[in-house]
Image: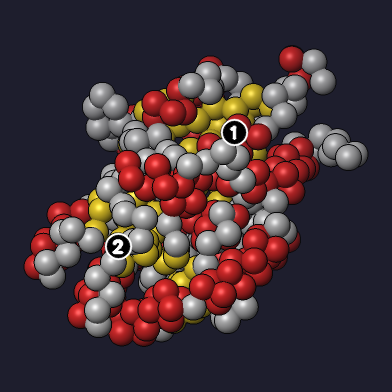
């Protein structure tokens, strides 16, 4: 293809913090074949990823900066982006970009529209019923709908009544090579984090939001300490609205010396290599990227038995599943793995073999082929 025939794609996100959907969009943009595709990104509200993303040299727009736009001005702003970059296809992620992007994309400019959801919307208490009804209506009008997990796709079809012919299952993919760190000095890295050599470190790398259920893990750590596991430490990576509440809980339980808040970080492979056990006690998930990353880093995983997570963890084989809100069961699962190194090794080995099928290369091939099909271009032959 010549430059004049490249496909111009606009990706739209509600915000740009270090969450799974934001990381996915960045990974897609990084992986696109630039001889075929020209990506553009717009976010409603910027966040921690902005400075990292700007290094890519991809056109980037902050819709609500420096001022908060009204809905009609947002529609006009998106329409101007479409016309400036001669956008052929838009890919919205989450509810608000779909609702506010439908008019400028489908009606005003007649570009192809693909919408992606990252978890079943019924679990998100922040989504108003009117917004959910609007999304349900609009999903019937878009050109394709992507679910990052089988549970999301099933939710589209069974509960939102999206026609099956429009639904595409494209699971998140992991570049395993990012987690094969050569010449990594684990002990020196842990020392920089304030960890001792004999500490048993549990990690949770996710934004500090309600659905990630950090409270449960902190309470489980308190239980472990009451049982004599005073060398158990918790490493939290991420930021979000629950930070002050979580810090207060840590203080109330007198765990200040055992819980480390790292804030936003981009050295996830090194952090994964520094911990001993990864734990994700979420109330719901779509396709949990951090679990796939932990598996790629050969770490044993403990997680809640909820939608999305149970799609990638077979209990007792490549991870441990626990009840959703049982701090006692979570503490017991952690203590069992602390005491049994051979069990940790077995789970990690099985997890590493399992995660290989969630290939970054296969994910990119699926997205590129989808984009080409939407525009009736020829798919790559390889």
Residue picked out by circle 1: 29
Residue 264 spot, x, y in % from top left:
33, 42
Question: Residue 183's x, y, as percent?
Answer: 56, 38
- Residue at image mark 2: 233
Residue drawn at (53%, 23%) of the image: 56
* Label 1, residues with CA under 10 Å away: few <14, some 14-19, many ≥20: many
* Identity of the residue drawn at 40% across and 34% down: 49
Left or right, residue 188 beside residue 227: right
Query: Relative to residue 104, is residue 258 depicted above or below?
Result: below
Question: Can residue 77 be spotted in the picture?
Answer: no
Mark 2 or mark 1, which is nearer the start of the sequence? 1
123 lies left or right of 184? left
Q: Which mark is residue 350?
A: none
Q: Residue at x 68, y 65 (%)?
A: 354
Relative depth, front residue between 48 and 230: 230
- In the image, residue 29 above or below residue 135: above
The colour scheme is secondary structure
- Name of the residue lying farthest toward the right: 381
Q: Against 267, is 314 above or below?
A: below
* Side (left or right) of 304 relative to 39: left
């Amino acid at each position: 293809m010549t430059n004049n025939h490249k496909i111009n794609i606009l990706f739209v996100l509600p915000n740009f913090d270090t969450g799974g959907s934001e990381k996915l969009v960045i990974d897609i943009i990084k992986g696109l074949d630039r001889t075929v595709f020209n990506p553009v990104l717009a976010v409603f509200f910027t966040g921690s990823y902005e400075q990292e993303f700007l290094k890519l040299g991809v056109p980037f727009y902050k819709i609500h900066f420096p001022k908060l736009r009204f809905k009609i001005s947002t529609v006009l702003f998106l329409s101007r982006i479409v016309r400036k970059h001669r956008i052929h296809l838009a890919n919205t992620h989450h509810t608000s970009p779909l609702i506010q992007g439908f008019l400028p994309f489908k009606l005003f400019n007649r570009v192809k529209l693909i919408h992606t959801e990252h978890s079943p919307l019924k679990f998100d208490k922040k989504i108003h019923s009117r917004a959910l009804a609007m999304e349900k209506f609009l999903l019937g009008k878009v050109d394709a709908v992507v679910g990052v997990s089988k549970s999301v796709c099933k939710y589209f079809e069974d509960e939102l009544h999206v026609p099956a012919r429009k639904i595409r299952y494209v699971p998140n993919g992991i570049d395993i090579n990012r987690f094969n760190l050569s010449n990594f000095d684990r002990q020196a890295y842990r020392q920089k984090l304030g960890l001792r050599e004999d500490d048993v470190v549990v990690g949770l790398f996710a934004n500090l939001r309600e659905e990630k259920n950090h409270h449960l893990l902190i309470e489980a750590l308190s239980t472990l300490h009451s049982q004599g596991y005073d060398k158990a430490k918790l490493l939290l990576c991420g930021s979000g609205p629950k930070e002050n509440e979580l810090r207060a809980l840590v203080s109330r339980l007198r765990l200040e010396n055992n819980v480390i808040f790292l804030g936003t970080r981009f050295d996830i492979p090194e952090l994964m290599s520094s911990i001993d056990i990864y734990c994700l006690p979420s109330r719901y998930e779509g396709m949990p990227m951090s679990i796939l990353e932990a598996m790629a880093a050969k770490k044993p995983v403990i997680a809640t038995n909820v939608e999305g997570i149970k799609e990638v963890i077979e209990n007792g084989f490549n991870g441990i599943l626990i009840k959703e809100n049982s701090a006692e069961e979570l503490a017991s699962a952690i203590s069992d793995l602390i005491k049994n190194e051979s069990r940790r090794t077995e789970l990690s080995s099985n997890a590493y073999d399992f995660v290989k099928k969630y290939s970054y290369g296969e994910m990119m091939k699926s997205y590129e082929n989808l984009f080409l099909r939407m525009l009736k271009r020829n798919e790559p032959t390889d």
